[in-house]
Amino acid sequence: MQRGVSYWVMAPLRWLARMADVPLRAWQRLTGQGGMIALFLLPNMAIFTVFVLVPLVMNALYSTTGGVEFFLADRPYIGSDHYQRLLDCGSYLDPLSCRDDMFWTAVWNTARFVIFQVGSIILVAMITALILNRAIPAKAFWRAVFFFPVLLSPVVVGLIWKWILQRQGLANLGMVELGLEPVNWLTERFWAFVAAVGVSVWAHMGFYTLILLAGLQAIPRDLYEAAEMDGTPPFRVFYRITLPLLMPNLLVVLVLALIRAVQIFDEAYVLTGGGPGTSTMFITQYIYEVGFANLLRNPGLAAAASILMAGVLVVLTLIQLWLSQRAGKR
């Protein structure tokens, strides 16, 4: 029988499989099914340990040390001094009353960013998903258009919008052509914050739109047909059918968007550099500046801030797991 090219291409893999068969069977007889599962999980656990667990432990150790030395053994132990400095505030609502006012300025900037960015991205993603779920011409093309920014590097996104929004950029050129006054998008505090929120929404809404679109397409069509036969108004159909059945997807989108918004750094840093002043300095940029960019670097303080930020992310992740389990029981 004549053998095709695929037979010879796969020949090395078949040989490796036969070689591995004997020791794997021996391991299974020795340890059972649990041992096989542990064996196949071992590479992933090793990678997780090297690239996640070890850096996390080292970061926690750095947060309890002082000085500017790089190696942990050369750094003096100072206990919880960095945490006390970060949390020492006359009023947490007034960053200027805090011992480290830059940290709390970054915290409140991040809080404002999370509120406006997450609210906007859910609203825009929902409207886009509802439109793309309808019978419109070139539906596949429009889905690709809205998802395309997700494929771009955050640095590329920041550079593109920086060229568009700078003083002599495309946005102001269009406004002048329309007879409007140009706007200092990146040099006025209010507009710089609006630009950071808007660019982030544009860059990430495609991902959340796909999640919501998948949820919309899973809703049985006969429910809409029955509502149409009863003459139910569109808003009532959305409120009584679409929204309740889409709630599990909305919860996933909400928590994922919250976690991503807390971690905002790259595109906002490229776009505004944290300015003007500290109007767009977010918590991740604070950690970067304190730990790496400032002349007087303080890696221990940056590590302590990142541990506090990790605590917030853990809480958000637990909320996501709780909401997912609750939605699964319904």
Image (spheres, rainbow, N blue to C red):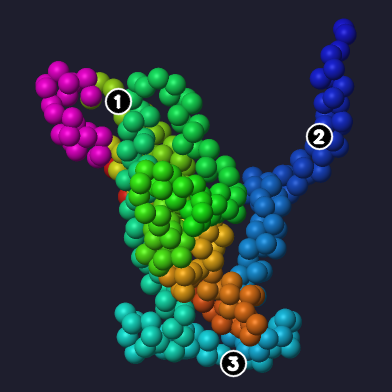
> What SS does tag 3 mark?
loop
Q: Which residue is labeled 1 in the image?
A: 220
Mark 2 in CB contact with mark 3 (< 8 angstroms): no
**What residue type is disc 3 on?**
Ile
Observer-nearest of 289 and 162: 162
Q: Residue at x 58, y 53 (%)?
A: 159
Residue 136, image x, y percentages: 37, 22
Query: Which mark is nearer the camera, 2 or 3?
Result: 3
Q: Residue at x 32, y 46 (%)?
A: 123
Which image quarter holds the N terminus?
top right
Residue 94, image x, y percentages: 33, 82
Q: Which residue is labeled 2 in the image?
A: 17
Q: Which residue is labeled 3 in the image?
A: 78
Among the 4 quarters of the image, the one containing residue 72: bottom right
> What SS does tag 1 mark?
loop
| Residue 12 in view here | yes
Residue 313, image x, y percentages: 46, 64
Observer-nearest of 235 and 113: 113
Cα distance in 3D space between marks 1 and 3: 60 Å
Image: magenta residue range: 224-244
